Image (spheres, helix red, strand yellow):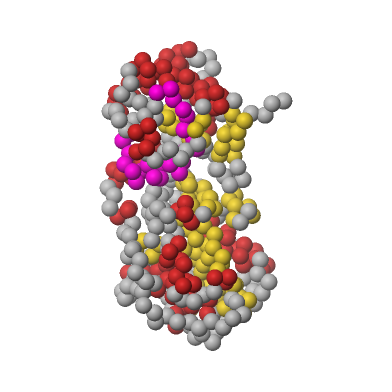
Amino acid sequence: MRWKNTFLWNGKPLYYNRIDQNNLAERSVEIPIAFMFLAQLEKRQNLLEIGNVLSNYENALSDYLGLRSRRIIDKFEVALGVENIDLMELPSAEKFDAIVCISTVEHVGQGYAGHAEDHDFEAPLKAIAKIYDLLEPAGKALVTVPFGKLLDGGWYIQFSQDYLNLLTSTYGIPAPAISTSYFQRIATELVELNPRQLWLQTQPEAMAETDYGWVYPYGNGLAVIELTKQVEPFKLTLDVPATPLTYHKPISETLSRDAFDQIYGVFKNLRSLNLIVFPDWSASEAEIQSALSPIIEAVMAHPDRAEVALLIDTTAIAEEDAGLLISSLLMELLAEQASEVTEEPGISLTGKLKPFQWQVLRLQLHARLKLSCESEEAIAQAQADHLAIVSLEQFRHQRITQLDTGMWTLQESRKD
């Protein structure tokens, strides 16, 4: 896969963070977002950072913008220039022009880093209300949190939209004061250190089932919350009854290593543009070969074949049997095109995936190629009926193009 150096935040291209300090997941996008937020501030004389994060990524730009003089508080981390203070104990009389808080509030009240605390599911919301209370009139704050399905991870809370809405309905932050953007991690390089990543700004509804630690380690969804202090008086009220919401456990805590290995095995075969077919394995071998042969031939002959992967669903057949049939087809086609094929065909089998594995694989799929004999049952089981459908003729006349978001798509070839 060809990775992109930039992502879009509200239409603005920003460079992904590539400093390898703890850069395994959401740091890739939240660091550049945080620095852009600070750089655009009109007033930055009185800055507060909650959680010692940005000091690991600073350079001469911080000196130029006057950011190093900010006050940094962190309840637990002992470091030069960091005050070990609990955010919730800061006097409300203290006010700040701007506050930045990167992936920190989700740990408030959750026993983070092995420190015993009373488990308060809504403590992260109370922390955000406290941040709002600490702002000067017209002051601004930026807070990032993991987002998707509402999770109790023990040492963190992953926010959902219903949970986030409590900032207004329960904790009294005016709705006009809150602006939120949402990011989903679409792809990650399968390496242990500083992987390249693809994050896409999206809508919260698209992330309702996004988990933490699945399919990629750590955060797979992110909410970027911007606060602007309104002129109307705000009374910080934290002693309120908890709202009855359902907090799930991260699916990663229940999965075996095999479940991860299986889906990563599929991911290793993915390329920039990933297509899928769902053969009807109950048809005769001749019918299946007749349906698959022109598809595989078209993929092998496509001008962008080095960037195209074709996945073949094998839910309803033993992978060994499917492998023999596909290998036979490939051998015939390779023999016919021996002088033309220079790259290894990007063709692979899905294996028997479970629904939670299909859920994450669907994010990687761009379209379904229409077969003359295909399994509607398999399509329904994979919940792949929402995928764009591309005919063989369309595919032959389309080229793949990378969008500004970093995603890839098929577009009609330009005719000179």
Task: Judge whether residue 13 is colored magenta.
Answer: no
Relative to residue 122, is residue 33 drawn left or right?
right
Residue 36 in percent (x, y) is at 62, 62
Q: In the image, what residue occupies the spot 34% across and 46% down? A: 356
Q: In the image, what residue occupies the spot 31% across and 35% down? A: 352
Q: Magenta segment, which residues?
A: 349-373
Task: Judge whether residue 351 is colored magenta.
Answer: yes
Residue 265 in percent (x, y) is at 37, 38
Quarter assignment of residue 86: bottom left
Residue 17 in percent (x, y) is at 55, 55
Q: In the image, what residue occupies the spot 61% across and 65% down? A: 37
Judging depth in this view, the residue of 101 and 189 nearest the camera is 101
Quarter assignment of residue 375: top left
Q: Farthest residue toward the top?
A: 336
Residue 103 in percent (x, y) is at 47, 65
- In the rendered view, tell whether residue 246 sits above or below residue 5: below
Q: Quadrant of the C terminus?
A: top right
Q: In the image, what residue occupies the spot 49% across and 33% down? A: 389
How many marks are shown on the rendered structure? Answer: 0
Relative to residue 325, is residue 35 drawn left or right?
right
- In the rendered view, tell whether residue 301 sits above or below residue 100: above
